[in-house]
Amino acid sequence: MSPHNDKAVVVFSGGQDSTTCLFWAKQRFSDVYTISFDYGQRHRKELEHAQAIAEQLDVPFHIIPMHVMNELTPNALTKANIPIEEREDGLPNTFVPGRNHLFFSFAAVYAYSVGARHIVTGVSETDFSGYPDCRDDFMKSLNVTINLAMDSDFVFHTPLMWLDKAGVWKLSDELGALDFVRERTLTCYEGIPASGCGECPACRLRNEGLEQYLRSKGGEQ
Ligand code: ZN
């Protein structure tokens, strides 16, 4: 990383992954900014939660309105009356085509405006639902495209890319943030913080990952 520019923008939702990324970024960069996208999430709590965490960790927080996504493609992440389930092609119906592509492009515009070179996101190939715009190839390609588009030298960081959920918990532990992430973040599709409803796919993934990590650590709870 360049010693001349130590600013980073974290794409932040207040969930386990992006909160772990925020701790990761705070350890590496002197100036860290956070942004969230408002696309009509099922639960407004998500944005309020993200803002509260950003305040607690003393980093600037900015919401970018993206309601147009909702108009273009109604889906289970934004419409409370659509149940979350798997589609015929194997992707969950929470998939929003092009979402990360657009969100990360907006993140880069924001990073440009605050003079940040580094952009951090919690995307992962390993433990998720096969969203194409979470993959490493896509992120590398997007990084090149954005640098060409803005004549810039942004660096996209994806510290969770090859981690499963247990690995993400391990990373948060290494960053000294395990308890914070466990108690303060919101991952649940039902909008319940910490260990959540325990039933939805996001809760199951999160809680199974935590159990797995704690077991591997030696049964410590
Ligand atoms: Zn849940």
Image (cartoon, rainbow, N blue to C red):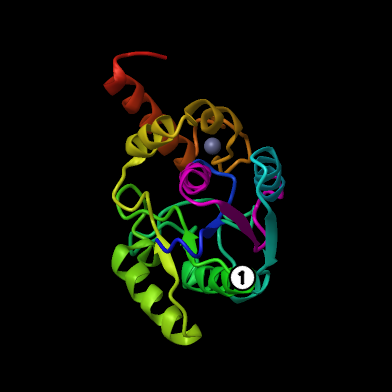
Residue 23 vertical placement versus 95 (above, below):
above
136 relative to 56 in the view: left or right: left
Question: Mark 1 highlights which residue?
Answer: 110
Residue 195 vertical placement versus 9 (above, below):
above
Q: Quadrant of the C terminus?
A: top left
**Can you give x and y, in whole percent of width and height, for residue 171 in the image?**
38, 37
Residue drawn at 33 percent across, 47 percent down: 127
Q: Quadrant of residue 194?
A: top right
Residue drawn at 46 percent across, 57 percent down: 121
Residue 80 is one of the magenta-drawn residues: no
Residue 23 is one of the magenta-drawn residues: yes
Ligand 1 falls in quadrant:
top right
Check disc 1: other Cα within 10 Å, few if <14, some if 14-19, many if 20+.
some
Residue 180 vertical placement versus 65 (above, below):
above
52 relative to 115 in the view: left or right: right
The mark tally for this picture is: 1
What span is in magenta?
A: 17-45
Residue type at mark 1: give it: Tyr
